[in-house]
Image (cartoon, rainbow, N blue to C red):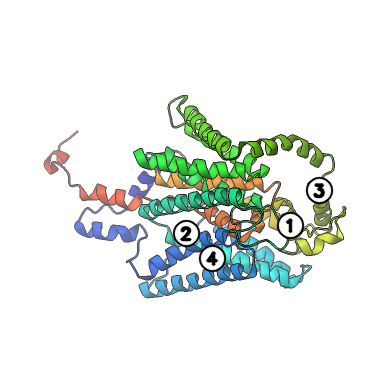
Amino acid sequence: MCAWSKGAATTMPTETSAAAEVRSPAAAGHAAPSLLDPFVFWGVFGLLLFGPVAFGAVEPWSILILETGAAVLLALWAIRQAQSGELQIFSNPLFFPMLAFAAVVILQLALGRTAYRYQTFSSALLYCAYGTLCFLAAQCLRRTAQVKMLTAVFSSYGFAVALFALVQGISSKGKLYWVRTPAHGGWIYGPYVNHDHYAGLMEMLAPIPLVFALTHYAHGRRRIMAAVAAAVMASSIFLSGSRGGMAAFAVEIAVLTVLASKKQKPGKAGLAAGIFVAVIVGLLAWLGGGELARRMASIHTEAQAELSGGTRIAMDRDALKMFAQRPILGWGLGVFPTVYPQFRSFYTDFYVNAAHNDYLQLLVETGGLGFATMLGFLVVLYRQAIRKLGNWPADTNGAVALAAMLGVTGILVHSLVDFNLQIPANAALFYVFCVLAATEPRFGLASRVVRRRAVPPENPQRSEAPA
């Protein structure tokens, strides 16, 4: 028996009557069902799935839907709590660093330490929507059956978006959904104007079917379907041409291979990884080998150009100069595009809307205090997630933590050279995955305890005899 089930058993009452069996679901945190429960549950995860297909939720109308939807769902959850007659809140270790970050932004607004108050307030509203979705996800996702449904939904969704991106990439150049041409251009892939942000989405979604295929819950046709979905999603990352996405996914595969090798027979994990990579290579060669080969060949040349004084390096240096002028509270959340022209050290006709490095942009906008809360956030995240990986192939809690942690890790690697966390659709999914990775073990606990109580002793008289 794994450690979390022992802990759950020791905290439960010792009674073995039928009444104890009836009360055990409530003791495990399951309130009486309500018609609002499915609305809130599917509303939260529906908003997460809405963002990517709405061009990444970067336009005012889609941001409005994201923020309004989160507020409405929070109101429905509050009504649900009022109906039950008690306030039941499931905590999460990440809530404290999230509140600390909110306090930094409130300080910026209260003390006037923002270069553009309206933009900081607008960005704060968006972060409130992220936080609301994280809070509601922690409240709604409580049962193993829900995890199974979401695994199927997110795997099918990722496969469908990847398939759409592949077809659109072959049949339509320069148009979103074959009909819309972006006003400011871009490297379109799938529903995103920027191919790097499409890759960021797939970095978070591909580990879900991939981890599921390696667990004890996947058998036969389900395992094959999950592996195929993961392979198609992974292939689309490479076909998108995102070099940051390729590196991030390679890190994810390396981490998964190391963890899988500890739970399987020697060589089996490496063989599975080799087969998976071979399938991806075959898909890439079939769908777009020539273009991908040219993109891969340019990595070394373009990397050398960047290191010798390219645009990204220049932006990084400029960002550090900005931080040096306001090192404590920064320039204000969301104001980087407004302030950066004063510090830009190179000429360009393009509008620089982000730092192309999420870490430096956070440092510039929120200063040392905001950056410290981010570091604390990540420390808590990985500490909590790693604690649950002891038996991930057979434990739903561990499998959820691993899939979410891999997706988060991919974005964190990619964020060194890009700005996925400035795209609302990707940022919302990222933060919710962080909360799920750090959630305390809860899946399968109540059912195990009830089953143990429901079985009476085989021979009561024998239990009284000396050992």
How busy is the neighbourhood of tag 1: few (under 14 within 10 Å), some, or many (20 plus)?
A: some
Residue flagged by tag 3: what amino acid is it?
Thr
Q: What residue is disc 3 on?
A: 311
Q: Nearer the viewer, mark 3 or mark 4?
A: 3
Residue flagged by tag 2: what amino acid is it?
Ala
How busy is the neighbourhood of tag 2: few (under 14 within 10 Å), some, or many (20 plus)?
A: many
Q: What residue is disc 2 on?
A: 138
Q: What is the C-alpha distance between the residues marked 1 and 4?
A: 24 Å
Q: Earlier in the sequence, mark 1 or mark 4?
A: 4
Relative to the observer, which residue lies in front, 36 or 299? 299
Relative to the observer, which residue lies in front, 238 or 70? 238
Disc count in the image?
A: 4
Q: Residue at x 69, y 52 (%)?
A: 358
Indicate whether 334 appears above or below 458.
below
Relative to the observer, which residue lies in front, 233 or 79? 233
Answer left or right for 153 relative to 235: left
Q: Earlier in the sequence, mark 1 or mark 3?
A: 3
Badges 3 and 4: C-beta atoms under 8 Å apart?
A: no
Question: For the N terminus, which image quadrant?
Answer: top left
How busy is the neighbourhood of tag 4: few (under 14 within 10 Å), some, or many (20 plus)?
A: many
The circle drawn on residue 132 is 4
Q: What is the C-alpha distance between the residues marked 3 and 4?
A: 36 Å
Residue flagged by tag 1: what amino acid is it?
Ala
Q: What is the C-alpha distance between the residues marked 2 and 1?
A: 30 Å
Q: What is the C-alpha distance between the residues marked 2 and 3?
A: 40 Å
Q: What residue is disc 1 on?
A: 354
Q: Residue at x 60, y 37 (%)?
A: 250
Badges 1 and 3: C-beta atoms under 8 Å apart?
A: no
SS under mark 2:
helix
Answer left or right for 36 relative to 229: left
Badges 2 and 3: C-beta atoms under 8 Å apart?
A: no
SS under mark 4:
helix
